Image (cartoon, grey):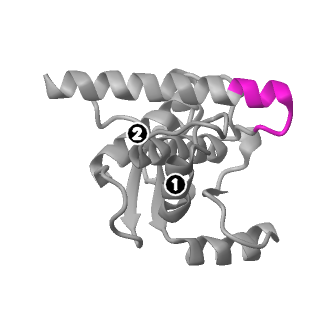
């Protein structure tokens, strides 16, 4: 399988600055998460980096909640169409014969929230990790991508599974980035 095979991601930066991660890397990371989660091979997600004001409006409009949040996902495919544990093979067979790009959904990340969470030690999957803003944005991007593919964390078991999956994806991404640099 070529590196270009499988689902794709596009990144839009409405909120610039504050995070030292390229749009190319973010797109590759989201595509990796989508592949691992069983997204259609012809699928495409859009990741948008915004500020707190923008995400607070989206949070109020779509979630009925006041104030900013760190990440929102807006799936366009019914989450039941994704298996809980998927492989790229099962995703490609499910969508066989569909050539056009298929919108999977949108992920919106507040860079302001990522900065604050990373700086204050409220980041990571445990909500108590102090790390770089780039690492927090990476985690939020993977988290959002998994939500697009039907993953959730509404029970202890589903949360543990989702957190494990995020860790696996981020480790694979880190290893791929290290190989790319050498």
Q: Main secondary structure of the magenta part?
A: helix
Residue beneath the point at 83% across and 39% down: 154
Pointer 2 local density, CA inside 10 Å: few below 14, some 14–19, many at least 20: many
Give the quadrant of the N terminus: top left
Pointer 1 local density, CA inside 10 Å: few below 14, some 14–19, many at least 20: many
In this view, the residue farthest toward the front is 120
With 143 as the anchor, is 174 left or right in this view?
Answer: left
- In the rendered image, residue 142 lying in the magenta stretch gets the answer no
In this view, the residue farthest toward the right is 155
* Stretch of the chain drawn in magenta: 153-161
The residue tagged 1 is 114
Tell me where residue 98 appears, x and y as whole percent.
Answer: 49, 45
Q: Nearer the viewer, residue 58 or 131?
A: 131
Which quadrant holds residue 173?
top left
Give the quadrant of the C terminus: top left
Q: Which mark is residue 29?
A: 2
Tell me where residue 17 appears, x and y as whole percent.
Answer: 33, 65
Q: Which mark is residue 129?
A: none
Instruction: Specify whether residue 42 is in view.
Output: no
Q: Nearer the viewer, mark 2 or mark 1?
A: 1
Residue beneath the point at 44% across and 53% down: 101
With 115 as the anchor, is 86 left or right in this view?
Answer: right
| Sooner in the amino-acid sequence: mark 2 or mark 1 | 2
Q: Nearer the viewer, residue 101 or 35?
A: 35
Which quadrant holds residue 166?
top right
Which quadrant holds residue 158?
top right
Q: Secondary structure at mark 2?
A: helix
Tell me where residue 162 appears, x and y as whole percent.
Answer: 68, 30
Calculate the distance from the C-alpha at mark 2 to the C-alpha at mark 1. Answer: 17 Å
Tell me where residue 177 appears, x and y as whole percent.
Answer: 27, 29
Instruction: Specify whether residue 162 is in view.
Output: yes
Q: Secondary structure at mark 1?
A: helix
């Amino acid at each position: 399988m070529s590196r270009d095979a499988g689902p794709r991601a596009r990144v839009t930066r409405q909120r610039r600055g504050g995070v030292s991660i390229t749009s190319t890397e973010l797109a590759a990371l989201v595509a990796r998460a989508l592949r691992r989660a069983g997204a259609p091979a012809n699928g495409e997600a859009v990741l948008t980096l915004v500020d707190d004001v923008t995400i607070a409006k989206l949070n109020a409009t779509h979630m009925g909640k006041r104030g900013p949040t760190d990440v929102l996902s807006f799936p366009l495919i019914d989450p039941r169409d994704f298996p809980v544990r998927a492989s790229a093979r099962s995703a490609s067979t499910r969508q066989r014969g569909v050539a056009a790009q298929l919108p999977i959904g949108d992920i919106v990340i507040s860079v302001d929230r990522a900065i604050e969470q990373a700086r204050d030690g409220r980041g990571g999957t445990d909500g108590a990790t102090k790390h770089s803003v780039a690492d927090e944005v990476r985690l939020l991007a993977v988290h959002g991508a998994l939500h697009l593919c039907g993953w959730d964390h509404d029970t202890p078991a589903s949360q543990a599974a989702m957190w494990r999956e995020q860790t696996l994806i981020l480790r694979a991404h880190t290893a791929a980035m290290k190989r790319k640099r050498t």
